[in-house]
Image (tube, rainbow, N blue to C red):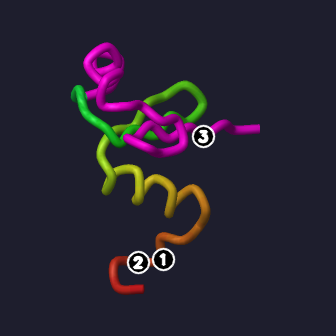
Amino acid sequence: MSTYKLFYFNGHCEISHFQWPSHKTEMPLGQIPVLEFDGTKLPQSMSITRFLAKQFQLAGRDNFV
């Protein structure tokens, strides 16, 4: 079974603004949001959105649908 973990300020894996400097080096591109899928970290919200849409067959058949 796959595991998903979302890192965001006040999100699922919450990181406070005070804790952020110590976690920044752990994140790809040094920013959040980050989705961790089975140990692989995927940064940036649009990349996360596209990945999840494809994972759950919500991406559409082509670029128009």
Residue 24 is left or right of residue 54, and the answer is left
Callout 3 secondary element: strand
Image quadrant in which the C terminus is located: bottom left
On the rendered structure, is 63 left or right of 61?
A: left
Queried whether the magenta region covers residue 11, the answer comes back as: yes
Q: Which mark is residue 20?
A: none
Please give the name of the residue rendered at 50% of the width and 63% of the height, measured from the top-left corner: 53
The residue lying at 47 percent from left, 45 percent from top is: 11
Residue type pointed to by label 2: Asp
Residue 26 location, x and y as percent?
A: 35, 17
Q: Which residue is mark 2?
A: 62
* Residue annotated with mark 3: 4
Badge 2 vs badge 1, beta-carbon distance below 8 Å:
yes
Q: Magenta segment: does it hold 3?
A: yes
| Percent x, y of residue 59 | 47, 70
Is residue 51 shown above or below 28? below
Q: Residue at x 50, y 41 (%)?
A: 6
Residue 7, compared with residue 44, is above or below; it is above
* Residue drawn at 31 percent across, 13 percent down: 22
**Magenta segment boundaries in residue numbering:** 1-28
Label 1 sits on a secondary structure element that is loop
Q: Say which label, 1 or 3, has the lower sequence index.
A: 3
Q: Amino acid at mark 1?
A: Gly
Q: Residues within 10 Å of mark 2 (few under 14, many from 20)?
A: few
What is the x, y in percent for residue 24? Answer: 28, 21
The image shows residue 36 at horizontal and vertical percentages of 50, 34
**Of helix, strand and loop, which one carries label 2?**
loop
Left or right: residue 19 versus residue 37 is: left
Q: Between residues 54 and 4, which one lies in front from this camera angle?
A: 4
Q: Are marks 2 and 3 in contact (CB under 8 Å)?
A: no
Residue type, numbered disc 3? Tyr
Q: Nearer the viewer, residue 44 or 15?
A: 15
